[in-house]
Image: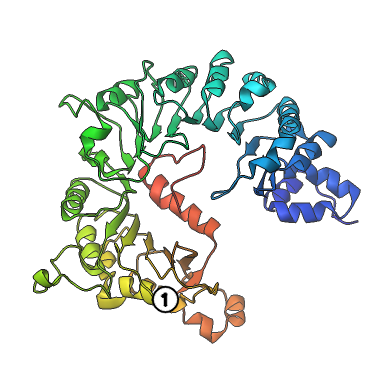
Amino acid sequence: MLLPPLNDDCARVVLSMLGKPELAALSRVSRPVASYIRPWLVRNVNVAKTTPSRSIDLGALRFVLKYDLGSYIQALTVFPPSGFVLDLAALLPVVDEFLRLLADVIESAVNLCSFRMYMYQRGYLEREPRILLTLQQRSLLQKLQFTDIGQADVDALLSTPISNLRCLQITVTDFLDVGIVFEIAGLSAQTLDELSISYTPPVEVYEQEVGSGNPSTVFPHVQRLALLNITMAASDIARAFPHLQHLKLVVWGQSALPAPFFFPSGLPNNVSFPELRSIAGHSGLMALPIHANLQRLRIDQTIISKDMFDEALQTMAASPLTSVSLIVRTRSAGEKRPRARAAQTREAWPYFSPTVISKVASCIPRVQFFELGFNWGRFRAYGLSPETCVKSALCLESACAPLAELKDLRYASFTVPGARDGAEDIRPNMQSIFDHLFNTLPNVKHLSARSKGMYQHRFHYRRRAETTSHAEESTVSSSTEEHPCIETTSKEALAAYERYSWEATGLKGWCVGGHEWQ
């Protein structure tokens, strides 16, 4: 016997604890084992490949059809990884076969709950109408995402309406008026609780273009709304989404545009967002009248001036925040002060990191999740190691000491610039730095940091459990026992992020297209 006799419930628990690599290895043990495990391999399947020359995994689609596994698929994804560069010439010869096999798999996936598709080329939905026709018939389908679709795809979505969705995410290109996308969303107006609409300017457009939209439909149950590169009147947002809890507004480049740019008709006094508790994206969102209820603040735009910083401090001080994420222009330890301000040491903008941390900490007494990114402007840390960069920003002059006063803080995350000219791929040793930070911050359970160039290195640590069994103590070396923290996985760090950045506020995180955690 390769496996002990288990009933289905026990086997289901065991298999649910295994990742796909382990399941795939186990399926090679024997034919009976393989037949039992195959359904678990396709419950959540992505048929996009990671290499440009093989951007589509036709083998995965054939595998599903060969073994009649379609009924086991709950989530089907055609989405390349971030940073993927498409080799269109390698894809063109197999496009028709890919679309045919994909439609066949969707037809067999009678229990499909989630479908996400990146359009390698626009017009796929018109080219293979069975994709939408079959999705239309999937009564369990709740999450739908189409990325980089054009006018022909939008027309196909309107002519083959898919309703009763909970989460919808659409990225359009080629046309500026995205109002037609709200018509597609309106087909599920009574069931949607999450909506994300993005506008991508055509490649040949060099100027920054921003789409616009004005929904005529009311979405009574939408709690999470994301508008990327789209402007809309604040009054229209309040009218169309009366029970909105989370609003994300992003303009690519995050240029320092004033609030009226995002809300063309201004902010009339009668605009009200009674349930809005979370904002993310551009600093212009801080102009909304929501401070009394705001629990979650994430500003992805770099705060580059003292006025912007003061506005952020004012917003934070007036809000009962439990989750805060900021990127602030700070002065690096090696950056010289302007001569005219040499006498104004710590009060000269941009501030040093201890001043930034101190000022922010004084405004967020209830925070549980705190994320701070440092931007050093034009200063480059040439010749400095990642360890030196992180230590200079977080450890010198007791920079993080003010965070120790935050009794509810459980997760802190920092992004520190680093040298970009290093060619070595050696992972820095950050243990001593994190030991120092955990000793400084007695209430924190999780710490993350990123550094070196384009943030190649990411580190996640958690506090070591206070109690350890006798058996465990005997296996731990004395050199390990002295460390108050241990390195953990990005998966565990993500779970902690979701707990302290979202669940702590009582809000639900994004259900389509990932999350804001990095």
In the image, what residue type sits under mark 1? Glu
Q: Is residue 507 left or right of residue 52?
A: left
Which of the two residues, 375 or 209, is positioned nearer the viewer here? 209
Instruction: State the count of labels.
Output: 1
Q: Is residue 46 in view? A: no
> Is the residue 396 above or below the residue 25 in the image?
below
User: Who's the residue at 37% across and 19% down the image?
Assistant: 215
- Which image quadrant for residue 332? bottom left
Farthest residue, direction top: 159
Which of the two residues, 90 or 139, is positioned nearer the viewer here? 90
Within 10 Å of disc 1 (Cα), the crowding (few <14, some 14-19, many 20+) is: some
Give the image location of residue 236, x and y in percent. Answer: 29, 22
- Quadrant where the image shows the N terminus: bottom right
What is the image's colouring? Answer: rainbow
Give the image location of residue 302, x and y in percent. Answer: 30, 53
Give the image location of residue 67, x and y in percent. Answer: 84, 37
Give the image location of residue 128, x and y in percent. Answer: 68, 23
- Which image quadrant for residue 378? bottom left
- Which image quadrant for residue 406? bottom left
User: Who's the residue at 42% across and 65% down the image?
Assistant: 449
Local SS, label 1: helix
> Is the residue 505 above or below the residue 483 in the image?
above
> Is the residue 289 above or below the residue 134 in the image?
below
User: Who's the residue at 48% across and 73% down the image?
Assistant: 422
> Is the residue 289 above or below the residue 301 in the image?
above
Which of the two residues, 489 or 197, is positioned nearer the viewer here? 197
Farthest residue, direction bottom: 478
* Residue labelled with disc 1: 387
